[in-house]
Amino acid sequence: MNRPTPSSYEDWLALTDIEKREVHRSWNVYNREGYGFPVCATGRLIISSLTKIFEVEVGTWHGGEYVLNAYVTDEDYPKMPQPLEQTFEGFRVFWMPLSKHFGLCYKKPEA
């Protein structure tokens, strides 16, 4: 039986990891069901990260799963968890180097 989508992000956070997976699996992510929940998670990931995140996007992983695509400097990238290894508030995180972001211009600060 599918668990209903929570009515607020606070209700989402109150779910256990297993309950979050159940709800997430019930969404048709290609139709953007539940899209507001990973959007909320992106902002909270930026705020809570000890490493500066330059950009974060909600992505759709193969098979219909929302993922958080987070871009950090090429220097910080080797220190980050492997792609999809980390979960943040119920969503897997795909860390990427800033040089792989097609639309973001980043100039390395002068020393």
Image: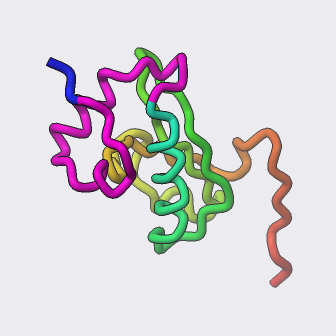
Which residue lies at the image location 51% right of the left edge and 42% below the top edge?
36
Colour scheme in the image? rainbow
Q: Which residues are magenta?
A: 4-33
Q: Is residue 13 above or below residue 23?
A: below
Instruction: Tell me if residue 90 is in the magenta stretch.
Output: no
The mark tally for this picture is 0
Instruction: Tell me if residue 30 is in the magenta stretch.
Output: yes
Q: Is residue 74 left or right of residue 89?
A: right
Image location (x, y in percent) of residue 55: 66, 54
Which residue lies at the image location 22% right of the left edge and 55% below the top edge?
14
Image location (x, y in percent) of residue 98: 69, 52
Residue nearest the viewer, comparing 90 with 82? 90
Q: Is residue 54 above or below residue 110?
A: above
Among the 4 quarters of the image, the one containing residue 27: top left
Q: Is the N terminus in the top left, top right, bottom left or bottom right quadrant?
A: top left
Q: Is residue 73 above or below residue 101?
A: below
Among the 4 quarters of the image, the one containing residue 110: bottom right
Image location (x, y in percent) of residue 91: 38, 42
Residue nearest the viewer, comparing 5 with 23? 5
Q: Is residue 16 above or below residue 35?
A: below
Q: Residue furthest front?
A: 7
Q: Is the C terminus in the top left, top right, bottom left or bottom right quadrant?
A: bottom right
Image location (x, y in percent) of residue 51: 52, 70
Which residue lies at the image location 38% right of the left edge and 50% below the top edge?
8
- For the stretch drawn in magenta, the main secondary structure is helix
Which residue lies at the image location 21% right of the left edge and 28% below the top edge?
3
Q: Residue furthest bottom?
A: 111
